[in-house]
Amino acid sequence: MSTEAQALRADIVNLRAALNGLEERLKQLESKGQQGSTGAGGGGGNGDVVASPQATTSTGSVGTSVGAPSRGVPGDVNGTQGCVPMGATRVVMHQIVIPAEVDGLGICFGGQVLSWIDLCAGMSAKTLARGPCVTATVDAVHFLHPCRLGAVVIVAAMVNRTFNTSMEVG
C-alpha cells in the first residue's frame, strides 16, 4: 500500500472518530433536552436550549458577528417562547477535495478549508437568527493533517452560546 493510501486511511479513521464524538455530544444534548432542562437566556456549553438573540450574528469556531435585527424563532420549546434546541442549529457539511482546490503536491489550500468552516458556521448561525449573519472573528484554526486530493472533508458546526447581539459557533 502506498504512503498516500495509508495517509488517506489515517485521515478517514480520524474523521470517523471526530464525527462519532460530535454525534455522541449531540445525543447527550438531545437527551438533556428531553428531560425538560432549559438554558433560557444565553444558552451555551451546559445549556441545551439557545435563546434567539436580539441581533443576528455568526462565526466559525469562532468569535462573534453582528447583522440585521432578529425576527425571533417561532415555537415553544419546553415552555420557553423563542428558544430552540441547540441540536437544531447543528450543521454538518461533507466536501470532496477536487483538483481545483489543491496545490502541486495534491494538498488542499488552507484558505479553502477556512472557507468551508466559515460557510458551515454561517449556516448554523443563520438557522438560529433567521436572518443575515456575518463572521466577526475566528478564535483559532490548527491544521493538524493535510487534506489530500480526493479526500472527504467533514465540517460540523453548532451554536454554542448566544449574547445580546452576537453568538458563538463551534
Image (spheres, rainbow, N blue to C red):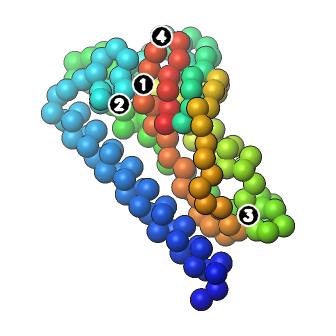
Q: Which residue is mark 2?
A: 45
Mark 1 lies on residue: 161
Can residue 124 be seen here? The reply is no
Q: Give the CA separation, mark 3 to mark 1.
A: 34 Å
Q: Where is residue 156 drawn, in percent x and y?
A: 50, 46
N-term-proximal mark, 3 vs 4: 3
Q: Secondary structure at mark 2?
A: loop
- Residue visible at 53% across and 17% down? 166
Within-10-Å neighbours for mark 4: few <14, some 14–19, many 20+? some
Residue type, numbered disc 3: Ile
The amino acid beneath tag 1 is Arg
Q: Look at the numbered discs 1 and 2 and tell me whether their residues touch, using CB distance below 8 Å.
A: yes
Circle nearer the N terminus (4, 2)? 2
Alpha-carbon distance for marks 4 and 1?
11 Å
Query: Splitting the image into 4 quarters, where does residue 160 fall?
Result: top left
- Say which residue label 3 marks: 107
* Along the viewing direction, whichever of 41 and 46 lies nearer the viewer: 46
Local secondary structure at mark 3: loop
| Mark carried by residue 164 | 4
How far is disc 4 from disc 2 in space, using C-alphas?
A: 17 Å
Left/right of residue 94 with respect to residue 114 in the rendered view: left
